[in-house]
């Protein structure tokens, strides 16, 4: 299994920035994808951004140009730089890991980190 530990959440004013980090440990496969999701109470968890071990990225339309996902494969850590934050982006942000080994998919979730954007 892969364990994920997020950090970097907190309270920020609208228009401000935060940087989230997610450190992965355990049986990490060299070919994998990591992502950030967010969830507001009463709503579905939504994808914010993802990045493969090869560096390919994908972003939700709503965050393009403001958020940047990156990773340090040597440290098994993924980052989410969030700029120009909006109040409606207040949510719990979750880190996600996925891979496929011998045709069997695996995935793990972090415990989540709260991001609160005050208006």
Image (spheres, rainbow, N blue to C red):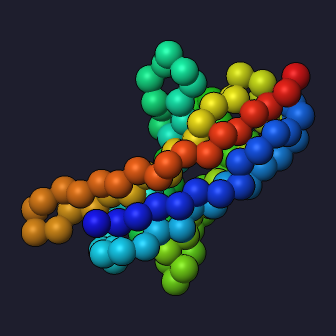
From the top left corner, tell me how far across and down residue 97 is, in percent: 39, 57
Q: How many numbered badges does the structure rendering display?
A: 0
From the top left corner, tell me how far across and down residue 48 is, in percent: 54, 40
Q: Quadrant of residue 93?
A: top right
Name the residue nearer the viewer: 43 or 102. Answer: 43
- Horizontally, residue 2 falls left or right of residue 62, namely left
Seen in the picture, residue 24 relative to 50 is either above or below; the reply is: below
Q: Residue at x 35, y 54 (%)?
A: 108
From the top left corner, tell me how far across and down residue 67 is, in percent: 68, 46
- Horizontally, residue 15 falls left or right of residue 59, namely right
Q: Can residue 31 be seen in the rendering of this structure?
A: yes
Question: Can you say which quadrant of the picture contains the C terminus?
Answer: top right
Q: Residue at x 48, y 31 (%)?
A: 46
Q: Can residue 49 be seen in the rendering of this structure?
A: no
Q: Residue at x 54, y 67 (%)?
A: 23
- Horizontally, residue 37 falls left or right of residue 3, namely right
Seen in the picture, residue 32 relative to 59 is either above or below; the reply is: below
Seen in the picture, residue 3 relative to 36 is either above or below; the reply is: below
């Amino acid at each position: 299994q892969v364990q994920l530990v997020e950090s970097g959440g907190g309270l920020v004013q609208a228009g401000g920035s935060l940087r989230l980090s997610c450190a992965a440990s355990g049986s990490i496969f060299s070919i994998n994808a990591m992502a950030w999701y967010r969830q507001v109470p009463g709503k579905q968890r939504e994808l914010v951004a993802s990045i493969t071990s090869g560096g390919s990225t994908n972003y939700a339309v709503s965050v393009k140009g403001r958020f940047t996902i990156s990773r340090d494969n040597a440290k098994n850590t993924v980052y989410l730089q969030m700029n120009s934050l909006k109040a409606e982006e207040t949510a719990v942000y979750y880190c996600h890991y996925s891979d496929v080994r011998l045709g069997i998919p695996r995935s793990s979730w972090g415990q989540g980190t709260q991001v609160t954007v005050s208006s």
